[in-house]
Amino acid sequence: MISNESNSDLYGISRIDDDQHHSHAWRVSLRRHGQRHVKNFTDKKCGGADAALRCAQRYRDEFLSSHPPISRKEVCLVRRSNNQSGVTGVCTYAKRHERRDGSIKENWYWEASWPGADGKPVKKVFSVNNFGDSMARQMAINARAEAIHALEGVFWASERGLVDEVAVAEQGHSSAPRQVA
């Protein structure tokens, strides 16, 4: 049985061992654009657990080369169902504070947010009091658009599946980068 496989070797692959139903297989399960792709490789049909794992890995590698991971830009452009501003990553909010006389003062802001290079969120805020509602909103939209334009790489959850050119070349494959996990 395979015991020294790294996490990237098993990316998208899990083991099924169900003695009650006599099911022993490796399962490839990946999601692309909201759709789950699942295929099982049984020990019996493939000639054992090790052979079934190699079949599953080959299938997974082929699948990933034809269905690359979603880019960070694509993730950032998905409009969420709870979006109320009409622009992904841009929202408006109020900061409330109590004045000395006991009255409540609201300061409104438009905020742009995007993922930073380190994966942590970056936010830029524009005051409605300083710029007016329309200008502050437009400034937030522009700031986010510039930041998204500069984004590179794949969505963080897909990074486990990437291998650089050196690792691929060491495995004796072509020098072009490819997906293995």
Image (cartoon, rainbow, N blue to C red):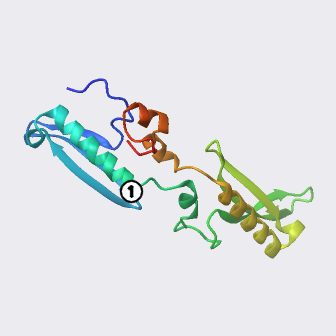
Q: How crowded is mark 1: few (under 14 residues within 10 Å), some or many (20 or more)?
A: some
Mark 1 highlights which residue? 67
Quarter of the image for residue 148 reads bottom right
Q: Quick one: 7 or 106, which is closer to the camera?
A: 7
Horizontal side of residue 134 vs 43, given as left or right: right
Amino acid found under the numbered disc labelled 1: His
Horizontal side of residue 22 vs 14, given as left or right: left
Q: Residue at x 52, y 50 (%)?
A: 154
Q: What element carries label 1?
A: loop
Quarter of the image for residue 79 reads bottom right
Horizontal side of residue 120 vs 160, given as left or right: right
Figure check: 168 above or below 141: above
Figure check: 143 above or below 172: below
In the rendered image, is residue 141 in sight?
Answer: yes
Residue 51, x across and y down, in percent: 17, 35
Q: Residue at x 22, y 51 (%)?
A: 39
- How many numbered dots are placed on residues in this image? 1
Q: Which residue is drawn at 68% across and 55% down?
A: 150
Quarter placement of the C terminus: top left
In the rendered image, is residue 16 in sight?
Answer: no
